Image (cartoon, helix red, strand yellow):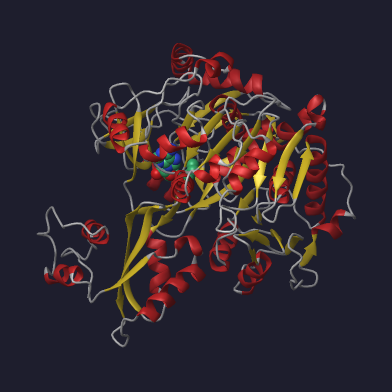
C-alpha cells in the first residue's frame, strides 16, 4: 500500500465496519446490540455476571453472594463451588464433543498430536493422580516450567482438578529467575521436560531446574519430568520422576475436587516497576467465567472453529486464551511449539493451512517481523480458512494493523485488538468482531460489564482526546485478588495511586491512554518504569539489579528505546567500577550476565558505558533524559534539577 493511502487512513481515523457476512452469524451482531448489552451490564453488573455464570458454567453448588466488594478486595460468587477442569473437560464428555479435537498440537520439528476431549480428560486425570502420588494436596503450589507441548496444558488442568494452584514459569526464563519464583511461591513440585525445541535448538529445561534447585529452593520435594527431546538428563534419585513411569502406576479415575469460587487457581509472576516480579493471584469462579465469556464473544467462537493463539502458556495469554477460555467453551485449540525462524519463516502460515485455522490471535511484534520477511511468504500459503484475527500485548502501530488486515485477512477478516493485562485475567477493552467498527491502532471499547475511564492524577476524568491514566472503576470477575504473600504491595501498586473524588479507589493499570469522541480507547503504553519488549513486560529495576550484581558494575540505569520490531528495546547505561575499563568484550559479558540472571528476553540491545548518571540533587536518576538519549533525540524540557550538568554532555559524547 502506498504511504499516502496509509497516511490518509491514519489521518482520517478510517472506520472498518465489520463485514456483513461476519456480523450475520456473530454472537453480537451490531453496534446496537453491543450497546444494549453494555448498558444492561453496567446498569447492574452483578446481575449481568450472575446470569452469565448460571448460563455458561457448571457449578457443583450455587453461590450465596454474587459479589463481596471491600475495596480493594473482591470476592465473586461467594459460597459457590465449581472446578475449572470440570468445566473445561468433564462437562463436554456427555456431549458429542467427547470425540472432538480439544488440542491440536504441532511440534517445531514437524511432529504432531491431536487429543480429543475424551483423551485429554484421561491424560489430565492420570497426571493429577501422579501428582497426588508425589504427595501433592489441595492448596500446594506446583511450578510448571515446560516447552509448548500438550503436557503443559495437561499439567495446568491437573493442578486445577485437585486444587493445587499452579505457577507457570515461561521456559525462556533462566534458572535464577525460576528459583526466585519457586522460593516466592514455596512450590512443592516442579513439572518440567527433558527439554523443548525452539528455533531449531534444544532448550535444556531440566538442566535449568537442576541449577535452580542447586542454588536453593528448599520447598521443592519432587520434580516430574516429561520426555520430549530425549536429550540425556540427570535424574536425581527419589527427587526426580519420569512422567511415563508414574503414568503406568496410577489410574485414570480422578474426580474433580469441588473448589470454592474464591479458592486460588494460579499464581503468575509479572514484572513491576519496583522490586522482584510479583505473583499475581487469580481465583477460580470469576476467572473461569470471565475467560469463558470473553473467549466466546470476542473470538466469536463456534463449535466448528479451529482456534489458534500463538502465545506461550508461560504468559497470561496462554493461560486464558490457549487453555482455559477455549477449553471451557469446548473449542478446538491449536498449540504450536515453535516460532518463526530463519529455517522456516512461514511456519505460522503452514500451521494455518495444515489445520484450516479459522481464528488467529498473535502479537504486534510478530506481525512486524512478518512484514520484514516479506508478504510473498504468507502469499504462498492458502489462508482462506481464516475468518477472524486478533492482536495482544502492546499497542499495534496502524501500519502493522493495515498489513495484517490486507495480507493475512485479505480485507475480509475483522481484527480484534485486545487490551488487557496479567492482572486483569481476561480481555478488557476490545472490539466485538461482529459489532464494533474498528480503527487501526485503537482497542476500541470496553467489554460488557467493564467500566473503564481515562483520568488525571486527581482521579478526575479527562476530556476526549486528552492523555491520562487508564483505570477500571468497577470490580470484574477475573480481577487480580492479591500479590502472593505481599498484600501491601497489591494495595500500593494498583489501588493507592488514584481515587475518585469521593475516595473510592480506582484500579490503576499502569498504562497511559486517551479516549476519542467516539468513546474509543487508544492505549499509549506504560507510564511506569516497565519496558515492553516484544510485548513482554520487564521492570527496569529488575534488569538494573541484574547488571549491578556483576562484579564490574558500580551502577546502572535501564530505559526503553523505541524499536521498529520489538516495540521497545532495552538500553542500559552502565557505570563501571573504578578498576574496570569499558570494552566491547565487557559489554558482551554484561549482556550474557543478564541472560543468566533473568533470561534471553531481558538481554540489553545496547550498553553504553558512562562515568556518571544524570541525577537530581536528591539522587534520583533522571530517566526522562536517558530515554531521550537512548532514542537519539535532542534533550528537551527542564534540566534545571540536574545535579551535575556536565554529565549530560559526556553522555551525549558517548563516553
Ligand atoms: O501496556 C499494556 C500492554 O501490555 C501490558 C500488560 O502486559 P502483560 O501483563 O504481560 O499482559 C500481556 C497480555 C495481555 C499492558 O499494561 N498491552 C496489552 N495489550 C495491549 C497493550 N497495549 C496496547 N494495546 C493492547 N492491545
Q: Is residue 388 above or below residue 27?
A: below
The quarter of the picture where the N terminus appears is top left
In the rendered image, residue 489, in percent from the top left (x then y), is placed at 43, 50
Most foreground residue, 297 or 241: 297
Q: Is residue 417 above or below residue 247?
A: above
The residue sitting at 21% across, 59% down in the picture is: 625
The quarter of the picture where the C terminus appears is bottom left
Residue farthest along the bottom direction in this orientation: 579
- Residue 163 visible in the picture: no
In the rendered image, residue 617, in percent from the top left (x then y), is placed at 15, 65
In the rendered image, residue 156, in percent from the top left (x then y), is placed at 68, 46
- Residue 219 visible in the picture: yes
Total number of numbered labels?
Answer: 0
Most foreground residue, 522 or 216: 522
Most foreground residue, 255 or 123: 123
Q: Is residue 424 above or below residue 210?
A: above
In the rendered image, residue 39, in percent from the top left (x then y), is placed at 44, 15
Residue farthest along the left direction in this orientation: 640
Most foreground residue, 27 or 209: 27
Compared across the picture, whether 329 is left or right of 170 comes to: right
The residue sitting at 30% across, 38% down in the picture is: 3
- Quarter of the view holding residue 287: top right
* Ligand 1 located in image quadrant: top left
The residue sitting at 17% across, 72% down in the picture is: 650
- Quarter of the view holding residue 284: top right
The residue sitting at 31% across, 79% down in the picture is: 576
Compared across the picture, whether 538 is left or right of 384 comes to: left
Amino acid at each position: 500500500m502506498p504511504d499516502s493511502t496509509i497516511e490518509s487512513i491514519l489521518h482520517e481515523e478510517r472506520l472498518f465496519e465489520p463485514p456483513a457476512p461476519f456480523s450475520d452469524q456473530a454472537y453480537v451482531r451490531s453496534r446496537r446490540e453491543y450497546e444494549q448489552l453494555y448498558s444492561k451490564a453496567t446498569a447492574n453488573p452483578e446481575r449481568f455476571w450472575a446470569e452469565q455464570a448460571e448460563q455458561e458454567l457448571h457449578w457443583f453448588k450455587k453461590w450465596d453472594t454474587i459479589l463481596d466488594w471491600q475495596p480493594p478486595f473482591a470476592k465473586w460468587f461467594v459460597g459457590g463451588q465449581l472446578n475449572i477442569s470440570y468445566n473445561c473437560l468433564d462437562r463436554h464428555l456427555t456431549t458429542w464433543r467427547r470425540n472432538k479435537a480439544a488440542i491440536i498440537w504441532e511440534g517445531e520439528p514437524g511432529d504432531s498430536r491431536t487429543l480429543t476431549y475424551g483423551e485429554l480428560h484421561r491424560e489430565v486425570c492420570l497426571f493429577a493422580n501422579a501428582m497426588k502420588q508425589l504427595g501433592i494436596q489441595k492448596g500446594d503450589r506446583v511450578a510448571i516450567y515446560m516447552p509448548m507441548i500438550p503436557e503443559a496444558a495437561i499439567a495446568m488442568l491437573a493442578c486445577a482438578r485437585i486444587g493445587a494452584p499452579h505457577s507457570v514459569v515461561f521456559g525462556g526464563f533462566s534458572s535464577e529467575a525460576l528459583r526466585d519464583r519457586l522460593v516466592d511461591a514455596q512450590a512443592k513440585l516442579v513439572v518440567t521436560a527433558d527439554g523443548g525445541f525452539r528455533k531449531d535448538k534444544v532448550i535444556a529445561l531440566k538442566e535449568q531446574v537442576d541449577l535452580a534447585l542447586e542454588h536453593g529452593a528448599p520447598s521443592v520435594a519432587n520434580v516430574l519430568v516429561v520426555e520430549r527431546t530425549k536429550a540425556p538428563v540427570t535424574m536425581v534419585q527419589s527427587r526426580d520422576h519420569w512422567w511415563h513411569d508414574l503414568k503406568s502406576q496410577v489410574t485414570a479415575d480422578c474426580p474433580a475436587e469441588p473448589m470454592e469460587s474464591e479458592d486460588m487457581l494460579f499464581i503468575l509472576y509479572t514484572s513491576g516497576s519496583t522490586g522482584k516480579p510479583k505473583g499475581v493471584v487469580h481465583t477460580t469462579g470469576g476467572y473461569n467465567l470471565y475467560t469463558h465469556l470473553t473467549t466466546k464473544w470476542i473470538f466469536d467462537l463456534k463449535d466448528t472453529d479451529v482456534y489458534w493463539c500463538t502465545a506461550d502458556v508461560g504468559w497470561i495469554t496462554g493461560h486464558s486464551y490457549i487453555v482455559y477460555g477455549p477449553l471451557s467453551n469446548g473449542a478446538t485449540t491449536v498449540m504450536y511449539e515453535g516460532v518463526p525462524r530463519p529455517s522456516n519463516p512461514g511456519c505460522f502460515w503452514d500451521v494455518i493451512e495444515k489445520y484450516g485455522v479459522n481464528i488467529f490471535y498473535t502479537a504486534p511484534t510478530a506481525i512486524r517481523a512478518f512484514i520484514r520477511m516479506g508478504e510473498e511468504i504468507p502469499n504462498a500459503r492458502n489462508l482462506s480458512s481464516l475468518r477472524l484475527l486478533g492482536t495482544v500485548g502492546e499497542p499495534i502501530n496502524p501500519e502493522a494493523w493495515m498489513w495484517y488486515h490486507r495480507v493475512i485477512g485479505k480485507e475480509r477478516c475483522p481484527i480484534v485488538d485486545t487490551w488487557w493485562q496479567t492482572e486483569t485475567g481476561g480481555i478488557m477493552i476490545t472490539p466485538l468482531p461482529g459489532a464494533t467498527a474498528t480503527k487501526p491502532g485503537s482497542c476500541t471499547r470496553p467489554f460488557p460489564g467493564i467500566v473503564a475511564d481515562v483520568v488525571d492524577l486527581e482521579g478526575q476524568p479527562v476530556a476526549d482526546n486528552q492523555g491520562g491514566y487508564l483505570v477500571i472503576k468497577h470490580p470484574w470477575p477475573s480481577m487480580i485478588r492479591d500479590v502472593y504473600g505481599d498484600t501491601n504491595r497489591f494495595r500500593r501498586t494498583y489501588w493507592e495511586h488514584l481515587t475518585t473524588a469521593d475516595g473510592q479507589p480506582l484500579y490503576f493499570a499502569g498504562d497511559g491512554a486517551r479516549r476519542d469522541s467516539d468513546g474509543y480507547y487508544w492505549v499509549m503504553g506504560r507510564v511506569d518504569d516497565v519496558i515492553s519488549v516484544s510485548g513482554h513486560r520487564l521492570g527496569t529495576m529488575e534488569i538494573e539489579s541484574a547488571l549491578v550484581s556483576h562484579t564490574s558494575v558500580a551502577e546502572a540505569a535501564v530505559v526503553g528505546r523505541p524499536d521498529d520490531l520489538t516495540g521497545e528495546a532495552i538500553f542500559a547505561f552502565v557505570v563501571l567500577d573504578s578498576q574496570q575499563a569499558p570494552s566491547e568484550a565487557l559489554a558482551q559479558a554484561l549482556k550474557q550476565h543478564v541472560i543468566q540472571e533473568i533470561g534471553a528476553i531481558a538481554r540489553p540491545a545496547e550498553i553504553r558505558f558512562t562515568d556518571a548518571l544524570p541525577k537530581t540533587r536528591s539522587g534520583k536518576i533522571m530517566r526522562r533524559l536517558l530515554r531521550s538519549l537512548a532514542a537519539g533525540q535532542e534533550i528537551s524540557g527542564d534540566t534545571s534539577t540536574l545535579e551535575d550538568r556536565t554529565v549530560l554532555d559526556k553522555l551525549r559524547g558517548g563516553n
